[in-house]
Image (cartoon, rainbow, N blue to C red):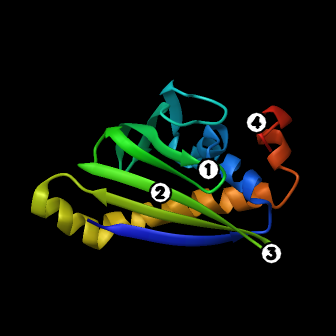
Amino acid sequence: MPTIHLTTFIAAPIERVFDLSRSIDLHKKSMSEYREEAVAGTVMGLINLNETVTWKAKHLMKNRVMQVQITSMARPFSFTDEMKKGDFKSMKHEHHFKAIENGTLMIDVFKFVAPYGGLGRFFSSIYLSGYMEKLLEQRNDLIKEYAESNKWKHVLDNKQGA
């Protein structure tokens, strides 16, 4: 099972980073070049425990649909989303947050199993892992940009725990 592990330093409070990471709207913005949109479930705002979102996007030259559910959450320290339906055989994305003196460490642990058995494992090893890591980095860069500037105010309002 390929595992991607990323650590991103963000000079912002843990609560802000946690909530930006759960924002459907910010996720859509980070994946706009793939025409990613939320088409069912929680389609805007912040996703919460046990809620689902169904994403539709064009990745790897094909339109794809994937439903994920938030299966665990300990605000503001962690949450996990897992694929319920989609192209992967399985997918689990753990989001961890650690407050440090000058900001927050955001840690992603992304595990997936590609379909198609041995052929899928081969494709994962030579291409898919790098592709998924690039997507996660792109998302994290936008979270960092918003969290470290006043842009976060356009995504989060006071009722959402910003």
* Left or right placement of residue 62 versus residue 8 in this view: left
The amino acid type, in three-letter code, at marker 4 is: Gln
- Residue found at the far bottom of this picture: 101
Reading the image, the residue beneath label 1 is 30
Secondary structure of the residue carrying tag 2 is: strand
Q: Height in image: 34 above or below 17?
A: above
Classed neighbour count for the residue bearing mark 1: other residues with Cα under 10 Å, few (<14), some (14–19), many (≥20): many
Reading the image, the residue beneath label 2 is 94
Residue at (79, 60) in percent of width and height: 13
Which label sits in the foreground, 1 or 4?
4
**Mark 3 vs 2, N-terminal side:** 2
- Contact? badges 3 and 1 (CB < 8 Å): no
* Left or right placement of residue 49 versus residue 18 in this view: left
Where does the image place residue 142, in percent across and percent down from the top left? 68, 57
Which quadrant is the C terminus positioned in? top right
Where does the image place residue 5, in percent across and percent down from the top left? 46, 71
Residue at (60, 45) in percent of width and height: 27
Reading the image, the residue beneath label 3 is 101
